Image (cartoon, rainbow, N blue to C red):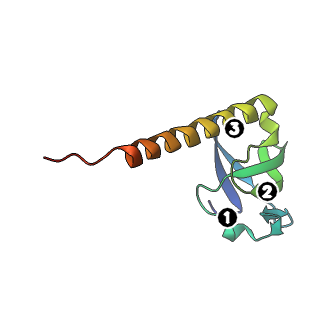
Amino acid sequence: MDTLGREIAVLLPIGLKVFYVPPDCPIFLRGERIKLRIVQAQDAVRITFEKSRGVFVVKLLEIGPLLVAPALGDELASIAQSFARRGRKLAEDATEGIADTPPKNS
């Protein structure tokens, strides 16, 4: 992320995209307005944007868990949520297996 140049790189399922964040762009973290410098690498984001003269310009930037850019469509959002559910299930199963396994005596 380049806060001086007001650019943010976002990893999307279709690849890495760089967005320009204008100074007047609203940025929210859990419903509270924040400054661009608060956004951290690997934050989940939802971006409303438009393409202007070949540049992706952010109109609204929201930071939060499991957010998917609305421009990617409902189908992609559904896929992302499905993967998140599977990940949580795998983590739960792995934790249960560890907790339920008695220690082996040598």
Residue at the left extreme, as displayed: 106
- Compared with 83, 21 (above or below) is below
Q: Position of residue 84 (x, y in %)?
A: 63, 40
The answer to whether mark 1 and mark 2 are in CB contact below 8 A is yes
Near-viewer residue (90 or 26):
90
Q: Position of residue 92 (x, y in %)?
A: 52, 44
- Compared with 36, 51 (above or below) is above
- To which residue does mark 2 refer? 61
- To which residue does mark 3 refer? 81
The secondary structure type at the circle numbered 2 is strand
- Res. 39 mark: 1
Instruction: Tell me the residue at 83%/44% (across/down).
Output: 53
For label 3, the crowd category at 10 Å Cα-Cα, with few meaning under 14, some 14 to 19 and many 20 or more, is some
Q: Amino acid at mark 3?
A: Gln
- Compared with 92, 31 (above or below) is below
Query: Can residue 4 be spotted in the picture?
Result: no
For label 1, the crowd category at 10 Å Cα-Cα, with few meaning under 14, some 14 to 19 and many 20 or more, is many
Residue at the top extreme, as displayed: 75
Instruction: Tell me the residue at 64%/56% (across/down).
Output: 43
Instruction: Tell me the residue at 59%/59% (across/down).
Output: 41
